[in-house]
Amino acid sequence: MSGPRDKKKEPRKTKKDYELSRRTMLKLTAAAGAGTVLSPMILTSRKSTVYAQGTVAEPVLCAPTPVPQSPPHTPFVDNLPVPSPAIPQFLNPAPTQNANIAGGEAARDPHQRWAQFTPAVTYQLEAKAGTHQFHSDYLPSYIWGFNGQYPGPTILNAYGIPSLVRFKNSLPATTTSFGTNKTTVHLHNGHTASESDGFAGDFFDTGLFKDNHYANAYAGIDDFPGFPAGDPREGQYTYWYHDHLQAETANNNYLGMNGIYLSYDLKTPPWEFDTPGSLRLPAYFGLTDIPILLAQKRFCATDPLNGRTEAFQVVGAGAPSTDKFTANGKIQPKLSVRRRKYRFRFINSGVVLPFTLSLHGPDGAQKPMTVVASDGNLLRQPADVSATSTPNLLEVHVSSRMDVIIDFSQFTVGQSVYLKENTQTPQFVSSPTPPDPAPGVPIGTVVMRFDVVGNTIIPDTPPIPATLTELPPIPAASTPPFEWGFRFVAGRPNAFRVSHSSIPEDNASHVATDLPFDPFTPAHVVLRGSTEEWIIRNDTLAGNWLHPVHIHLEEGRILERSICTVPSATGCLPANRTVLPMPAWEDGNNARRDVYPVPGQHRLKIRLAFRDFVGRYLIHCHNMNHEDAFMMMRWDVVESMAELRKRREEINAERIAKGDTPLYTKEELG
Amino acid sequence: MKRRKFLTSLGSDKPSSALRAPVQGVPHVASPGPAIFTNARLRTHENKEVRFYDDLIKGKQVLINLMYATCEGTCPLITSNLVKVHKALKDRMGKDLFMYSITVKPEDDDPAALKDYAEMHNALLPGWTFLTGDPYDIDTIRYRLFNMNHILVDTDVYSHTSFLLIINDATNRWLHVDPQISLFGVLRKISWADPPKSREQVIEDNRKLQEKIDQERRMYGFRKTV
């Protein structure tokens, strides 16, 4: 940089010189934009050093045994951060329908419905190593994140405005045991074409990028050709995007490769004032509508010479056993709120355990939260979670999203309100354990604290409407149900396989010939435009792992949840099944889901329509180390009856060759 | 002058290579060594005493699985699949890639029993070693390397995990795969622990994959197997 003194010595510049330099400046800015624009580089010096270096040194991992205790922390020091919105940018090279191999794009199928939904907004998110400070008492930890941030930037969308996100893989070329430097990114649970859906086998190497095309249209595009396209009753509003690399999803997500994606429409616009069709829920992003990405972590002090550097703890091939909860990447943060309604979107980013939440006032009494959406779908009628409701706790299973509204006008200024986690082992805070912040609320169970700091400045929203949305009718299924079952098999607890309701339960097909995930062969093939009834059953005994099963592409409706009262090795007699009541955020008449929690001995009957796109999709347990090991299967959507018949015959033949019962009856072959 | 140059190098935004963070492609976190692997004295199926880390793991790319000679569950299938893996990678086996099968019932499986087992499964192959040892050492290795954090699996050797651990000690890369998936799937996972590919190789592999996809789309009308 030249100071004013040097300027005098320089030869006078002509107008052209200035134009040139201005143009060069613009070019430089554009070039730098790819890497820097999306993140709040100016805000924190630590993050900017990440960009200056280009590479962040990997930490030395702590030994897996004995499992170290995380360093202590002081509760309620940091404010709850809200992951900043991603900023749209032009992409160079421009996105193309066919993979731009010469330009460095990963191999893929051409985008479906590209001309119909030409992307109007484009983003670039770069997966790379960075650092993140999980608590002010801690030094920055090594993470992998989108744009080097954890959580990644939040992508804000509107129905009717198709978007495209370029996921660039800039993960370190050499890595240790921590994560795997390949990635494929799933938008959970976008109604997304297969080639943009982050199929677990469609990963790509460091140095390449991949464009994920999001139509931002409601499901049912062909039946509802209006604007925005699709059936507005199929609206989904809270999503998250995350790494879905086969067999390594747990590690990569634990390292931080996920972020939030929200959609708006005229029903739930990003404003609160009265506009036609608006539900007028709390809606100002980051002010009154706050997504909260929940996670569990464990840290270890790895650099005793120079203070310490906290690293994540990874134990063997299994699940990380954790002792800290994080909300938006902070341990026990606090949030200042005013006396009015707020919308919080809880997202459990895992890796394996459910959060079971309740809200407690300063007197320790449980206070109500109103659930308005489950897995991103508005409930037909909202439901309260309070001391007197059944259930009185809000379960947020891994990858599930639960939108709640909390009305802080029930509290007085100066009071503190606590979000409590009820089922997990309480986190380690410090030694000796600090006193309970409220009666009956041990400090270790508190995820975060809300501080009521004053009366509201932005006017409060009107009462929550009694009916939020009309749900599309549950479609009739075209075939008898297919079954996806968990069984306990030696060496692979809870093997997962597809079967058919017509196959007797004591048949070998239900037992031990199960295979782990194979991205190259589908377990089941369905026809685009058809509806099927699927049964998800967990035949392991109650008390074993609960499997939150996730199905890509479509939201489903739960028809029935039942429990087998007399479990046996040969399946469950119909007489021994008892139908269980379902909470309002599960019942198919009131809610739509894409994560189906199935505890041992439970059986869920769901109905799904397969619309708009074809290709390869997944059904899997979303406990991430479970899906990594074996609880994932590929299923395909095909376009024509002829193709369906051919593919189903292939699956039957393959099963017969293995000594298995064929999956499809003659009628089902089409 | 020298001092000035030094200061300039500190001030510039491109520090000298010595000051820069580790260069990509160079392993910057060393293997934990015996601290995790242990250096237990084990016996091979040829009744040779070996040190687990120093002789078998140090600086090598290795595949490790658990078995026991009388296992009738998934072990025989896994062993036969591993024979296929060995065949597919036989050019590398014993040179830069090694396979170790560790018995989880060392009290029953002496070196001779392991040799019989290997013979029976046509697994007496170069670069593939069956190992037994002191039960305490074997249990330590099993718990440290194959921990599933699942009480039923971790405490019961009979439901030992079927994972194949893939470890490249030179780059400290750890992965695991279930050897019961397709051979191609297993080989692909093993390749993830190979030394990093060059930029040119990544681009070339990506181009080939797209060719395969396009070929399948022409043949079947959709992407079928890749």
Image: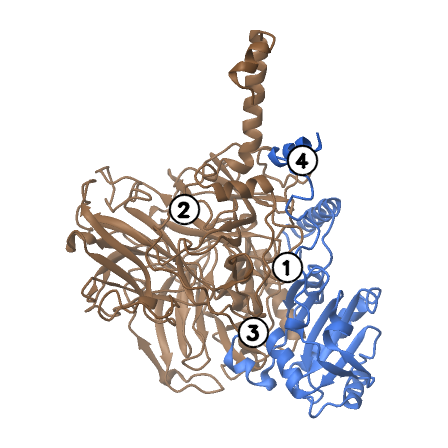
Q: Alpha-carbon neighbours of circle 3 within 10 Å: few (<14), some, or many (≥20)?
A: few
Whichever of callouts 3 and 2 sits on the residue coming sooner in the sequence is: 3
The circle drawn on residue A473 is none
Residue A526 location in percent, x, y? 52, 60
**What is the chain identity of the residue bearing mark 1?**
A
Q: Which residue is mark 1?
A: A176
Q: Nearer the viewer, residue B8 or A241?
A: B8
Residue labelled with disc 3: A65
Label 2 Cα neighbours within 10 Å, binned few <14 / some 14-19 / many ≥20: many
Whether discs 4 and 2 lie on one chain: the answer is: no
Report x, y in % for residue A303: 55, 60
Residue at the image point whose x is 60% and y is 75% from the top: B144
Residue type at mark 4 is Phe
Q: Which mark is first along the chain, 1 or 3? A: 3
Tell me the residue that label 2 is attached to. Answer: A83
Indicate which label's residue lies in the foreground, 4 or 1. Answer: 4
Residue B6: mark in rendering? 4
Among the chains pictured, the one given blue colouring is B
Amino acid residing under circle 3: Thr
